Image: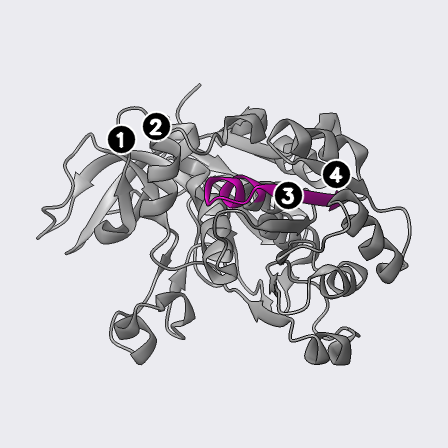
Amino acid sequence: MVADNLGVVLHEKNDVRMEALPMPQAGAGEVVVAMDTVGICGSDVSYVTKGRIGDFVLRKPMVLGHEASGVVHALGEGVTSLEVGDRVAIEPGVPCRRCEHCKHGTYNLCADVFFCATPPDDDNLCRFYKHAADFCHRLPASVLLEEGALMEPLSVGVHACRRAGITAGQRVLVCGAGPIGLVNLLVARAMGATEVVVTDISAGRLELAARLGAQHTLLVDSKDAEALAGRVAELLGGRQPDVTIECSGAEASIRLGIFAARSGGMMVLVGLGPAEVTVPIVNAAVREVDIRGIFGYANCYPAAIQLVEAGLVDVKPLITHRFHLEQSVQAFETARTGAGGAVKVLIKCGEQ
């Protein structure tokens, strides 16, 4: 053990500690990254507060964090795509590269994947971290390292909007104005959506959605999904959305998404809530509303980086709080409670 590498380790529910970690050594095809910025995701908060997400259960101490960027510190054997000093965004999932899904390009569905956000795999909220070189994406000079850390949630938006088939001139409903809902708003606008409605239970988050480009916002103050769907149509001049992107995982919101979508339209499920929900499936079937799910992303980091580099997407307004690595416990509490209007909380991993 050396004191040069420090990390934030979750031992059990609500037990987060700063600890010395071994200094990683790059193997063949790997790089060691001096970490710069790690964002806190809702899944990180769930592991801290609940010790699990569905079937993924914390059974041993685990380093937290997976929305990350940094600077290449050392190269392993055979690495030619990167150089020491390169600034990179780290795509956290490394698949087996051999299975049918990997060979077809849908490597997010690989069953044998290392993903630095899921037990038992250690994550990257630390000073130095080792990762597969081909899943470290070089950042253009115009893209900040803080923006690089947000390529992970932005890639979720890219994947969801691709699954939705969003094209120019479409009307889109985004259910939920948390970080994932907001990146879907940004990507939908960049892909050509001309009208976007965003719903949420928080007026403050809806105000941010409006600043980020939502033409319409709807405060959810009822559980009557059909009535809310009618209000969405009113906002769109009597027309229904071509696409609904559901980002909350709440049953009532999923119901809203189905009722709101136009006949022949599409709903994409992004948010993960209860394992089973009651939804108006016959309504969706007889109106030919397609329902699709997503799991993570595949081949989306390059597009996410290009959207930011080209100025088509600006993720900086999502950043509301910054903490040093030594303040990680406070950072997680801020993310958990939403204190101070927290949307995206970043942790800076270098020495203060």
Element under disc 1: loop
What's drawn in magenta, residue-wise?
A: 185-199
Pointer 4 or 2: first along the chain: 2
**Quadrant containing the C terminus in the rendered view:** top left
The part of the image, by quadrant, that contains residue 197 is top right
Q: Is residue 128 visible?
A: no
Placement of 41 over or under 102, stated as above or below? above
| Residue located beneath label 4 in the image | 217
**Quadrant containing the N terminus in the rendered view:** top left
Picture coordinates of residue 182, whole percent (x, y): 60, 40
Instruction: Give the residue type at disc 3.
Output: Val
Asked if disc 4 and disc 2 are in contact, CB closer than 8 Å, the reply is no
The part of the image, by quadrant, that contains residue 264 is bottom right
Instruction: Give the residue type at disc 2.
Output: Val
| Residue located beneath label 2 in the image | 143
| Residue located beneath label 1 in the image | 140
Element under disc 2: loop
Pointer 3 or 1: first along the chain: 1
Between 15 and 173, the one nearer to me in the picture = 173
